[in-house]
Image (cartoon, rainbow, N blue to C red):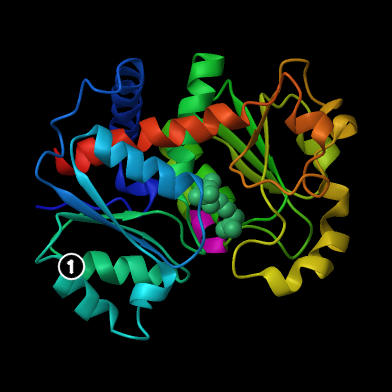
Amino acid sequence: MKRDFLSVRDFTREEILESFEIAKDMKKDRLKYSEVLKGQTLALIFEKPSLRTRTSFDVGIQQLGGYSLYLSPNEISLGKRESVYDVAKNLERMVQGIMIRTFAHQIVEDMAKYAKIPIINGLTDLLHPCQAMADYLTVLEHKGKLDNSIKLVYVGDGNNVAHSLMYAGARLGVNVTISTPKGFEPNLIVWQNANEDAKKTGAKIEVVHNPQEAVKNADVIYTDVWASMGQESETDKRKQIFKPYQVNSELMSYAKDDTLFMHCLPAHRGDEVTDSVIDSPNSVVFDEAENRLHAQKAVMYKLMK
Ligand code: CP
Ligand code: NVA
C-alpha cells in the first residue's frame, strides 16, 4: 500500500520521532543512505516559486541515489492545460514519486487519490508539512526535547505554516500558541483537528490575539510573511493590519533570554521581523533551512525505501 505525505497528520507521533532520528543520522553523513532511491525518479511539480523546497528536494534526492525532475509552473498548469487526473495517470507510468507545490490543497489530495505512487506536499495554501518537520527537528536539536514543557508561539498570519506547526505540535505534545489579528485566525477545521490530536498527547493548542501576552514564557517565537504566495494583491492592506505583530526586539523582550527565533523563510525584513531579531544569536532560521534537507530525506526514506 503506497503512502503519501500531504499533512503531518499522515505520520503518527512515533513515525515523526523516528523520522527525526533518521534525519539526524543522515545529517552526520550525507552519503550513508545513498542507495535508498537508487533507480527511482521523483517529479517535482512547482506552481509557485521556491528556493529552499526546490534545492532541498533536488539535493536530497541526489544524496539518496535517485533522480529528480523539476517541472516548472509554466510546464504543467495543473488542472488548466491538463486535468489533475490525467497528470497523475501519466506521471505514475514514468516516475516513482511526486512532490507538489501548488495552490488549492484539494489538488494534492486528488493527486494522491489518483496516482499509485507516493505524493509529497511541498506547500499548499492550507499546509506546509515538510516545513513543520524541519522546524520541530530544529527545536529538538536546540532544546533537546519535544514535549509539553516546550511552548512555541507563532505570531502573524494564521496560514499554511501556522497550520502545519499546529498539527505537528499536537502530534508531538508541544504547546502551540497562535497569535493573530482578528479575522486572520487559523482555519477552524485545522484547529479542531489539532485539538483532537492534542487530547492524546496533552499539548495545548491555543489561538489568541495579544502578541505581548502570547510570547510570555515562549521557548520559540516563530513568524512568517504577512502575505503568502497568491495573496500579493493584499500586501499593502495586510502591512497595516499586521504592524502590531512585527517580531522586533521589544516583542522578544517579553520572552526569555534563550527564546529561539524561527522563520520558514523567505523573510520580509522590516515587515514581520526586524534585522535585530533575525540576525540575533537567538535566531535559528538557517538551521531550519538546512533541516529541510535532512527532514525531507527522512520522509522520502519512510515513503520510498
Ligand atoms: N520555506 C520555504 O518553503 O521556502 P521556499 O518557498 O523557498 O521553498
Ligand atoms: N506562508 C508562506 C510560506 C512560504 C514558504 C507562503 O505560502 O507563501
Main SS category, magenta section: helix
10 Å crowding of disc 1: few (<14), some (14-19), many (20+): some
Q: Quadrant of residue 182?
A: bottom right
Residue 112, image x and y in percent?
24, 64
Residue named by callout 1: 91
Q: Choose between 208 and 211: the one closer to the eye.
A: 211
Q: Height in image: 88 above or below 284?
A: below
Name the quadrant of the C terminus.
top left
Ligand 2 quadrant assignment: bottom right
Q: Choose between 109 and 88: the one closer to the eye.
A: 88
Please give the name of the residue rendered at 33% of the width and 75% of the height, measured from the top-left corner.
76
Residue 289, image x and y in percent?
52, 35
Give the secondary structure at mark 1: helix
Q: Is residue 100 left or right of residue 284?
A: left
Residue 274, image x and y in percent?
82, 38
> Which three-letter amino acid code belongs to the residue tagged 1?
Leu
Q: Is residue 292 left or right of residue 217?
A: left
Residue 200, image x and y in percent?
40, 36
Is residue 263 visible from the viewing direction of this image? yes
Q: How many marks?
A: 1
Is residue 173 visible from the viewing direction of this image? no
Q: Quadrant of residue 70?
A: bottom left
Q: Is residue 293 rendered magenta in the image?
A: no
Please give the name of the residue rendered at 49% of the width and 64% of the height, measured from the top-left corner.
48
Residue extent of the magenta highlight: 188-192
Q: Choose between 209 and 74: the one closer to the eye.
A: 74
